[in-house]
Image (cartoon, grey):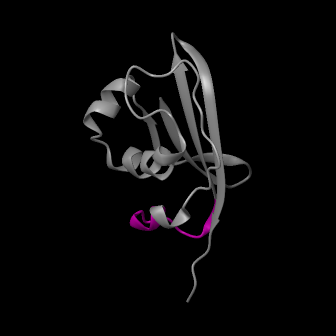
Amino acid sequence: MRIQLLKRASGYKPFLYNICQSDVCEYLEKRNHPFVNIIFNSFTNRTNVNRCPLPPEIILEHFRFPVKALELLPLPSGDYAIFITFSFDSEERALVKVYFTLTEYR
C-alpha cells in the first residue's frame, strides 16, 4: 500500500507525505501510523479491506472523503490530492484518487 499527499502547483506534486507501507496486513494488525490512520479511518466503513486475509475483490462504495479529518494536519489553503495504491503480488491492483480544496476562512 502506498499513500501520497499531493498539492497542486503546476500539476500535482508530492507534499508532506509519501508513505509506502510494504505490507497492508501488517498495517491492519498494528495501525501504527498517524497519517495512514487518518486516511484509512475515513473510508473504513465503506470498504471490505478491514482485516487479513484480504478479499479477492476490493470494494469501496459511496465514498465521500471527510475533509474535516485533515484538520489535525497543518495544511495551507490550496488544491490537494490523495492517491492510495494497493499492490498485490508486485502488481498494482487498485488506485483510489481523492481530490479536494482547502480554504482558510478568517
Q: Foreground: 44 or 33?
A: 44
Q: Quadrant of the C terminus?
A: bottom right
Vertical placement of residue 37 versus 24, above or below: below
Task: State the residue at coordinates (61%, 27%).
Answer: 94
Give, as a single range, the part of the protein colored magenta: 70-79
Residue 72: within the magenta?
yes
Task: State the residue at coordinates (65%, 42%).
Answer: 97
Vertical placement of residue 16 versus 22, above or below: below
Task: State the residue at coordinates (54%, 45%).
Answer: 46
Of all residues, the one furthest to the top in this rendering is 89
Q: How many marks?
A: 0
Residue 33 vs residue 73: left or right?
Answer: left
Task: State the residue at coordinates (45%, 22%).
Answer: 54
x and y percent of residue 33 in the render? 31, 43
x and y percent of residue 75 in the render? 49, 65
Residue 60: within the magenta?
no
Of all residues, the one furthest to the right in this rendering is 10
The quadrant in which residue 83 appears is top right
Of all residues, the one furthest to the bottom in this rendering is 106
The quadrant in which residue 50 appears is top left
Residue 67 vs residue 26: left or right?
Answer: right
The quadrant in which residue 93 appears is top right
